[in-house]
Amino acid sequence: MKLENQSVVVCGGGGFIGGHLVKYLLGQGVHVIRSIDIKPRADWYQESHDVENLVLDLSEMSACLRAVTGADVVFNLAADMGGMGFIENNKALCMLTVLINTHVLMAAREKGIQRVFYASSACVYNGDKQKSPQVTALKEEDAYPAMPEDGYGWEKLFSERMCRHFEEDFGLQCRVARYHNVYGPLGTYDGGREKAPAAICRKVIQAKSSGKHEIEIWGDGHQTRSFMYIDDCLKGTRMILESEIHEPLNLGSNELVTINQLVDLAEEIAGIKLKRNYKLDAPKGVNGRNSDNAKIKKLLGWEPSIRLRDGLAKTYAWIESQMMATVPK
């Protein structure tokens, strides 16, 4: 399938990844007919004026039917989620996203949609395989036996299975990517839903501008992660949607760093060194998580390749511009 010949809907288009995806597809000549989000349009991270932008609650079946009408392809990125501080303390809200995924699939089947992309997460992986910071990179088969992140991870894993069975039972073509820690400009950097790269950038900027050269780090700083820059996420998302890969596929960088190393990079970008205060009782998630990219390289001949230092510099610059714009003159 080539997207240039299709009419496309993006669910969650007012969010960080969804807003970038709409602009990316439009820039590639794809006919995006509609962008959907539950947030008031004034709160969307980005809004493209060449598409129909609708505020709908996609947990409701009637809203999903309205959303997908006239489309050939649906990207489902809609979810109630955030960084670790949010998902560890809002498990029920995260689980309720299953209503969105269920109704999007039901509406897609009813309206004869050709293909659905579902944005899953690395949070589906078995927690026993993520206990050490020296983690072995996670292969797709490591999601089973199932022991995902409580709440958010279970919702994602269940929805993956639902995609699989809608394809098996009803012939609805589904493509699933497991996103690993997506970051970049034009996203959340405060308020409690931000992820680690944006949170670290914000804290470094605050420390530098205030003159109080200290930073609070959640956990001991030794926990490890990989972080994927938004441009790699967008390219991989399109490639997976257009592919004939029917099983979930990792979409993430395999550049493993500790949280301390993430802070090192932000300090280097800022030209500052900070005293580190470790909040050991804060939510920190698993001790180690990294993406094994063997399968995506084999099947698509590609993997995310933007270095963390480069992507973080762009993210830092954008967050700094936003924060400085709100400082009283």
Image: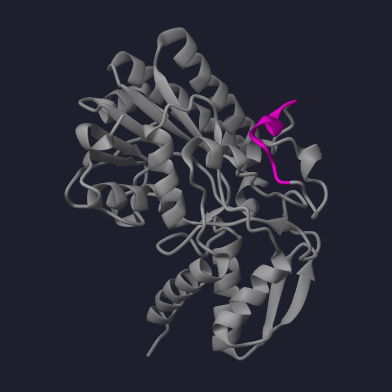
Instruction: In the rendered view, tell whether residue 147 sits above or below residue 218.
Output: above
Q: Nearer the viewer, residue 282 or 321?
A: 321
Residue at the image position 42 percent from the left and 56 percent from the top: 231
Q: Which quadrant of the structure image shows residue 221?
A: bottom right
Horizontal and vertical percent position of residue 26 = 23, 48
* Quarter in which the N terminus is drawn: top left
Residue 142 magenta: yes
Q: Is residue 29 above or below residue 277?
A: above
Q: Is residue 306 magenta?
A: no
Tell me where residue 164 appears, x and y as whole percent: 52, 19
Res. 250 in view: no
User: Which residue is at 80% across, 59% downward?
Assistant: 281
State the quadrant of the C terminus. bottom left
Which residue occupies 58% across, 48% down?
A: 180
**Residue 296 pos. (x, y %):** 54, 39
Give the magenta range.
137-145
Q: 211 above or below 147? A: below
Position of 69 relative to 97 (above/below): above
Q: Where residue 47 appears, x then y in whole percent?
A: 27, 54
